[in-house]
Image (cartoon, helix red, strand yellow):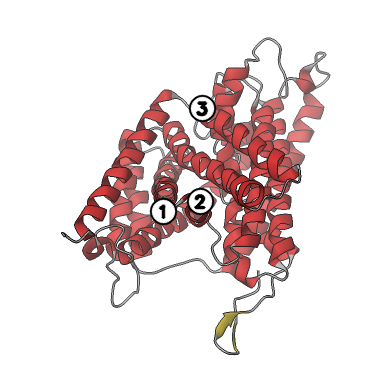
């Protein structure tokens, strides 16, 4: 992605230089070519071997939501977030709760990255999990406190390297399957549908986790002010990114399911894909894939923690949260250091008390509420208020809303209970802050 430049006209504005190709490449870097691999074992077990089906169902939900993001970017080209869209169409409180759900996503991302990195590192050096959890929580926090960030160029080369590993791994898997044949009738279609284990409820529960493979596609809309013809290209790029992610992810998990069809037995369910790769390509491929995923997740964990810190800083600066703590900015590093430490502590506590599966489901609790809000915002803005009776402004956003809500409802009760508790905390915080700033008459 080209670097952002400033031009001087009547004022400083961002240069519109990004094309559809730039945006799609940016989206794929954010999502990462290895996105479905950390989730593979959990989704395989929950969906009883139907990982491909969950990925494809999730893709339908994300494509519909991607259209809604693109349409809202036309209306609010400088906003680029579910919070802004919902707030504009449904008012401050609805927008606040949507933003509060997004805060949950940002806080949980470094948490699940800490869990996964600890499990993957234990595959290399088998020391107790708690030590690895402490190590990675401290690593993310200390690097972010020093203001160390990966550049766009480094992220681009990492994405290329990960893509090369994926291609090599798939070649090894094809070679393994070719040598393992011939197969029984129906073997090649079982990852899509196995009549012996298929259950719609378990598939949708698996889908509620598998959708994490797509998280990050909405970041494309935040670049609206730098895009050539954003009214057209944001929508196209967001849809293409979701579609490409879905196809790549489906190929990866399909091959993995064929190599390891016994979805109930993995040496470690959280890092199952590393063991699948090891079965196809031996110890060398096991360590290549495990190491690649570890590096990718370390990068994601660092970026997610800093993103959470910046989001909390913005809320503190706007007095939505106590500004003395959350609005603090380190004078030397220009990093919201208190928020970085706060996020690091939460990541460590969560890594020691929560499973990767529960963390992923809870993250998706907030994400799906945000996606539902964006779909409803399109319906409200175009069909209700704008009185545009074209079928697409009625069918597509409501279909996206229905699919997102159904997948959201398929989350396990533990995730929904904790998610609703988080929303209640947010509502109480909003009430107390409003009461504190309301003048006494």
Query: Which residue shows up at 59% across the image and 53% down it?
Result: 218
Q: Please provide percent x and percent y for residue 140.
A: 38, 56
**Dots 1, 3 in contact, CB < 8 A:** no
Q: Kindly identify which residue carries mark 2.
A: 86
Query: Residue at left 67%, top 69%?
Result: 227
Task: Mark 1 or mark 2: name the one nearer the start of the chain.
Answer: 2
Badge 2: residue crowd in 10 Å (few <14, some 14–19, many ≥20): many
For residue 135, say whether it is visible: yes
Q: Residue furthest bottom?
A: 9
Q: Quadrant of the C terminus?
A: bottom left
Residue that carries the numbered disc 3 in the rendered image: 409
Per the image, the residue denoted by label 1 is 92
Q: Does residue 300 appear to the left or right of 199 in the view shown?
A: left
Name the residue at the front extreme: 441
Do callouts 3 and 2 mark residues in contact (Cβ within 8 Å)?
Answer: no
Sequence-first tag of 3 and 2: 2
């Amino acid at each position: 992605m080209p670097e952002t430049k400033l031009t001087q006209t009547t004022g400083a504005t961002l240069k519109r230089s990004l094309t559809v190709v730039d945006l799609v490449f940016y989206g794929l870097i954010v999502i990462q070519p290895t996105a479905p691999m950390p989730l593979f074992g959990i989704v395989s077990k929950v969906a009883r071997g139907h990982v491909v089906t969950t990925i494809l169902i999730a893709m339908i939900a994300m494509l519909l939501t991607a259209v809604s993001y693109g349409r809202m970017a036309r209306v609010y080209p400088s906003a680029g977030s579910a919070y802004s869209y919902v707030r504009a169409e449904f008012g401050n409180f609805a927008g606040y709760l949507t933003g509060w759900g997004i805060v949950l996503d940002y806080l949980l991302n470094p948490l699940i990255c800490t869990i996964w990195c600890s499990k993957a590192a234990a595959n290399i050096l088998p020391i107790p999990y708690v030590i690895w959890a402490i190590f990675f929580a401290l690593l993310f926090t200390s690097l972010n406190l020093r203001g160390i960030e990966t550049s766009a160029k480094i992220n681009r080369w990492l994405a290329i390297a990960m893509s090369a590993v994926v291609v090599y791994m798939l070649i090894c898997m094809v070679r393994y399957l070719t040598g393992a044949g011939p197969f029984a009738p129906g073997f090649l279609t079982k990852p899509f549908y196995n009549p012996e284990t298929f259950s719609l409820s378990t598939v949708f529960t698996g889908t509620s986790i598998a959708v994490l493979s797509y998280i990050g596609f909405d970041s494309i809309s935040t670049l609206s002010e730098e895009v050539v013809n954003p009214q057209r290209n944001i929508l196209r790029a967001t849809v293409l990114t979701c579609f490409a992610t879905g196809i790549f992810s489906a190929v990866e998990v399909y091959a993995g399911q064929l190599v390891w069809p016994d979805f109930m037995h993995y040496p470690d369910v959280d890092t199952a894909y590393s063991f699948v790769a090891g079965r196809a390509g031996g110890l060398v491929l096991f360590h290549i894939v495990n190491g690649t995923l570890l590096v990718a997740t370390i990068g994601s964990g660092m970026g997610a923690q800093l993103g959470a810190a910046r989001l909390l800083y913005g809320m503190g600066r706007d007095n939505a949260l106590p500004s003395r703590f959350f609005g603090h900015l380190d004078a030397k590093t220009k990093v919201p250091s208190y928020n970085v430490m706060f996020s690091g502590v939460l990541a460590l506590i969560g890594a020691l008390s929560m499973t990767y599966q529960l963390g992923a489901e809870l993250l998706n609790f907030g994400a799906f509420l945000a996606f539902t809000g964006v779909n409803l915002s399109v319906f409200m803005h175009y069909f209700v208020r704008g009185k545009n009776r074209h079928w697409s402004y009625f069918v597509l956003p409501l279909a996206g809303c229905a699919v997102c809500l159904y997948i959201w409802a398929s989350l396990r009760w533990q995730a929904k209970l904790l998610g609703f508790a988080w929303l209640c905390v947010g509502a109480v915080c909003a009430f107390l802050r409003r009461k504190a700033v309301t003048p006494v008459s």
